Amino acid sequence: MQSGTMRAGAICGIPNDVRILSVAAPDVGPDDVIVTPKRVGLCMTNVKMARYGYYAIDQRGLPFIEGHEVAGEVVAVGRNVSEYRTGDRVVVYVYVPCHNCHFCRKGHPTMCENFILGGIYPGGWAERVKVSREDDFSRRLHKIADGISYDDAAMLEPLSCVVHSIDRAGPRLGEKVIVIGAGFMGLLHSALLARYPLDLNLSVDLSEFRLKYARRAGASHVLRNEGEDQVIEQVMEITAGYGADLVFEVTGSVQAYNLAVKLLGKGGRALFFGGTPSADPMHVNPRALHYDMLQLIGVQSAEDQHVARAMNLINTGSVGFQGLITHRFTMEQLHEAILFPQDADKREQMVKAMVHGFDSEIVAG
Ligand SMILES: [Zn+2]
Ligand SMILES: [Zn+2]
């Protein structure tokens, strides 16, 4: 492929200045693989980035060509590349830890200091994405099994994060578990938790619409959140007054962080998955933390092992994503896609939005 230009969606200003730019297209060097994105999941992190700014943008600067939930087709390979061929269907994993920095060496690869600047750039919002051997093919390019759709494959990054979250919380046989939030990430939690022999897999959400999906995803019970007191009362009733063993917070709101702690029984664990847009403090009763031996656990992103296992779940068709994609946009509609969930009424009706790569028609699959 000769050098030239390509189209790419970019955050050009905060808030919400998202445009299609013409940028330099990557050349294919002898150790490079070029992928044309077919599906790029719209992540709520993208929406937060465009609306509020993000540390990744501070590091990389504007315009910022993101897109980190990428499945596509290999369209060119360099002459030294034998591992991939033109026509291969792959997931491009944009952000992987360097394994070299202070935090990676301390065993916290998702705190990697080179996470963003070491990411594949431009990301999946571009017409062509280049991955080089020095980026580490085995961690960056995951082959999609025959019969698995680009739609499902593009779920690798979010699913990896949920595998990490559940690993970190470590659900045990017969526990009573609650997931607060039945948005896309909450539903993935409910779906994976349904594979464990739990005593309760309860999904709590404000929206009856989303709770329908939670039932389908595998939640054993659902509860509409009509206010903190009502949720606490209902949960105490369901748990015979003992509270939950494990609560996942998957909304990113401080109210839900507070609620998660209040739903815990003695000895309980709360896992905080949703990133909050503000740094408003949460409230924790220090006596409960101490005497009830509560564990409050954070989680962010995914490590290599979670990605490998999530890809295995996808390639074996083990997670039912069917019906979770409620909205589709073309890449030309990226601005519209970013604005869409910022409207509370529209957000209410959305589970997952998929952006189709440039020149990919809007057809499911
Ligand atoms: Zn994401
Ligand atoms: Zn690192």
Image (tube, rainbow, N blue to C red):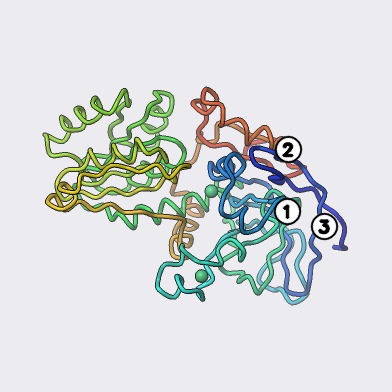
Kindly report the distance in space between the C-alpha atoms of the residues bearing marks 2 and 1: 14 Å
Q: Amino acid at mark 3?
A: Ala
> Tag 2's secondary structure?
loop
Q: Nearer the viewer, residue 183 or 77?
A: 183
238 and 346: which one is in front? 346
Disc 2 within 8 angstroms of ligand 1 (CB): no
Residue at x-position 44% and y-position 65%: 305
Tally of numbered tags: 3
N-terminal of the two: label 3 or label 2?
3
Q: Residue 361: which disc?
A: 2
> Around disc 2, counting alpha carbons within 10 Å, would you say few (fewer than 14), some (14 to 19), or many (20 or more)?
few
Q: Is residue 287 visible?
A: yes
What residue is at 28 percent from the left and 42 percent from the top?
283
User: What kind of element bears circle 1?
Assistant: strand
Residue 321: give x, y in percent of width and height. Answer: 49, 41
Q: From the viewer's perspective, is 262 left or right of 183?
A: left
Label 3 belongs to which residue? 24
**Amino acid on which the number 1 mark rests in the picture:** Thr
| Marks 2 and 1, the one that precedes in the sequence | 1
In three-dimensional space, the C-alpha distance between marks 3 and 2, rounded to whole angstroms, equals 24 Å
Secondary structure at badge 3 equals strand
Q: Quadrant of residue 142?
A: bottom right
Decide: is 68 above or below 202: below
